[in-house]
Each structure stands twice: as C-alpha cells, then as structure tokens.
Image (cartoon, rainbow, N blue to C red):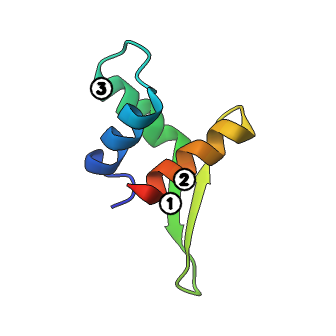
C-alpha cells in the first residue's frame, strides 16, 4: 500500500518531484527509489535511496504521512 499510486502521487505533488515530467514517469522513478518491507517482528521498514539524506528523509516522511 505504501508504494501504491495513491500514496506516491500525493508524495510527488507535495514535494514537487515531477520536475516537468508526466506523473507516470515521476511515479516510476519514485517507485524505484523506495522499498517497503515488513520484518519478522512485524515492523514496517521503509528504505529510500536518493543522493541526499535530507531528501530521503523528506520523502520517507511524506510517504508515512500519506
């Protein structure tokens, strides 16, 4: 659910991640940068792989808020 188009579209809009690209391209790019898994302990793990730690934190927070 965390990497569904409903969530990702809100993140893209709120952080202006489309950079003039169609929403589908921005969504695909963001999908490749995010990995959500559930551990054996039942806790959700969200990994965001982008060049900047500040940007990764902003994306992670936006995903969680959405």
Contact check, label 1 and label 2, Cβ < 8 Å: no
Q: CA distance from mark 1 to mark 2?
A: 13 Å
Q: Report the number of discs.
A: 3
Contact check, label 1 and label 3, Cβ < 8 Å: no
Q: What label does residue 23 carry, if any?
A: 3
Q: Mark 2: which secondary structure?
A: helix
The answer to whether any part of residue 48 appears in the image is yes
Q: Mark 1: which secondary structure?
A: strand
Mark 1 vs mark 3, foreground winner is 3
Q: Quadrant of the C terminus?
A: bottom left
Residue at point 46%, 27% (across, down): 17
Q: Which residue is mark 2?
A: 61
Looking at the image, residue 5 sits to the left or right of residue 54; the answer is left
Q: Which residue is mark 1?
A: 36
Examine the rendered structure and indicate whether residue 39 appears above or below residue 57. below
Q: Mark 3: which secondary structure?
A: helix
């Amino acid at each position: 659910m965390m990497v569904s188009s409903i969530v990702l579209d809100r993140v893209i809009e709120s952080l202006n991640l489309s950079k003039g690209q169609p929403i589908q391209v921005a969504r695909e790019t963001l999908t490749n940068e995010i990995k959500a898994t559930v551990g054996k302990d039942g806790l959700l793990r969200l990994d965001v792989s982008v060049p900047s730690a500040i940007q990764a934190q902003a994306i992670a927070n936006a995903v969680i808020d959405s």
